[in-house]
């Protein structure tokens, strides 16, 4: 009986030491009456490329009586035990340069590393020597093995119990107006299924057009004023062929509030450039969907 009692006491002591370790508060004070709260962290593991990306979203609240400058928030996303690890990719943003009294703003972004089994990643405030570990919140996880690559016009790229995003390329159209080539109709929809803010592992769409720079054509001013029907009848000079990346508009989704769905209607604009309408080149305009963290890339050919 004594042996059994001793075993039970030993178990209780062990449990008190290891089983009841308190989780760190996701909120820390960065100066008097100014706090940073970690809202969401997403870990994307790419097994194919042996990389790991951390997406993060935090809220900075100013409960003081004076405005707070976010320029004083100098931080890195790093492993606390090994602060000298080098990133391979990163993006960081602060929504506001100053925070008025009783207001707040978001900081968000991502950082990518070679996957060396980092153990204690978090936000390190360099000037203040503070560290807010990602483990203070429940870290969501995605693997590149869960990403769905599809040749369909409409498909779900990724979904789980918290988050989903869909691609709809079924209504992509080309048009020429006001001297510009435009590609419209690509939609990427992001859905937050939870009751909290989520950071978004966004997909970056890019489009390229191979064709003619109208500024290098005879009667360029007249060409720029033509309608689409008129410009398609013009025989351009082949020696002025060019390749241009379009400017995308209508696309920016870095985080989502609770239960929110955002549909991004993406438009690509090419100033003073048109494809060759007199050849059967199916690669004249190509949209590429990319995600470095997922190791994902897919091309969509635009029909003229």
Image (tube, rainbow, N blue to C red):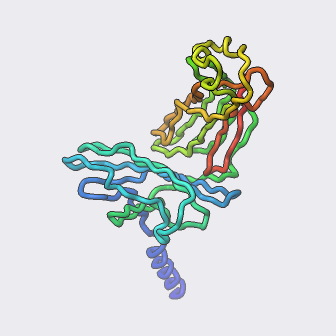
Residue 174 in percent (x, y) is at 66, 22
Q: Residue at x 50, y 83 (%)?
A: 5
Q: Is residue 64 visible?
A: yes
Q: Is residue 183 visible?
A: no
- In the picture shown, does residue 128 fall above or below 288? below
Residue at the extreme bottom of the image, as rendered = 2
The answer to whether residue 18 is left or right of residue 141 is left
Q: Residue at x 30, y 58 (%)?
A: 29
Most foreground residue, 219 or 253: 219
- In the picture shown, does residue 23 fall above or below 17? above
Q: Residue at x 46, y 43 (%)?
A: 197
Residue 237 in percent (x, y) is at 72, 24
- In the picture shown, does residue 205 fall above or below 12? above
Q: Quadrant of the C terminus?
A: top right
The answer to whether residue 73 is left or right of residue 133 is left
Residue 263 in percent (x, y) is at 55, 30
Residue at the extreme left of the image, as rendered = 65
């Amino acid at each position: 009986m004594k042996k059994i009692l001793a075993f039970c006491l030993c178990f209780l002591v062990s449990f008190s030491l290891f089983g009841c370790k308190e989780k760190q508060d996701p909120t820390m004070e960065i100066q008097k009456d100014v706090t940073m709260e970690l809202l969401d962290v997403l870990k994307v593991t790419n097994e194919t490329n042996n990389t790991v990306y951390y997406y993060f979203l935090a809220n900075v609240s100013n409960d003081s009586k004076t405005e707070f400058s976010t320029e004083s928030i100098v931080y890195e996303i790093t492993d606390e035990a090994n602060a000298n690890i080098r990133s391979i990719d990163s993006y960081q943003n602060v929504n506001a340069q100053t925070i008025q009294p009783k207001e707040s703003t978001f900081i968000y972004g991502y950082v990518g590393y070679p996957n060396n089994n980092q153990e204690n990643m978090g936000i390190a405030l360099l000037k203040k020597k503070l560290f807010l570990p990602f483990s203070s919140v429940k870290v969501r996880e995605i693997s590149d093995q869960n990403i769905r690559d599809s040749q369909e016009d409409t498909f779900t790229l990724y979904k789980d119990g918290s988050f989903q995003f869909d691609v709809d390329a079924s209504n992509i159209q080309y048009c020429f107006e006001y001297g510009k080539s435009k590609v419209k109709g690509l939609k990427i929809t992001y859905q937050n299924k939870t009751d909290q803010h989520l950071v978004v592992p966004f997909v970056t769409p890019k489009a390229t057009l191979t064709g003619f720079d109208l500024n290098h054509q005879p009667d360029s001013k007249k060409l720029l004023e033509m309608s689409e029907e008129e410009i398609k009848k013009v025989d351009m000079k082949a020696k002025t062929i060019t390749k241009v990346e379009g400017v995308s508009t209508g696309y920016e989704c870095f985080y989502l509030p609770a239960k929110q769905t955002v549909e991004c209607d993406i438009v690509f604009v090419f100033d003073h450039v048109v494809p060759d309408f007199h050849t059967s080149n199916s690669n004249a305009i190509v949209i590429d969907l990319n995600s470095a963290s997922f190791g994902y890339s897919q091309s969509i050919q635009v029909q003229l």
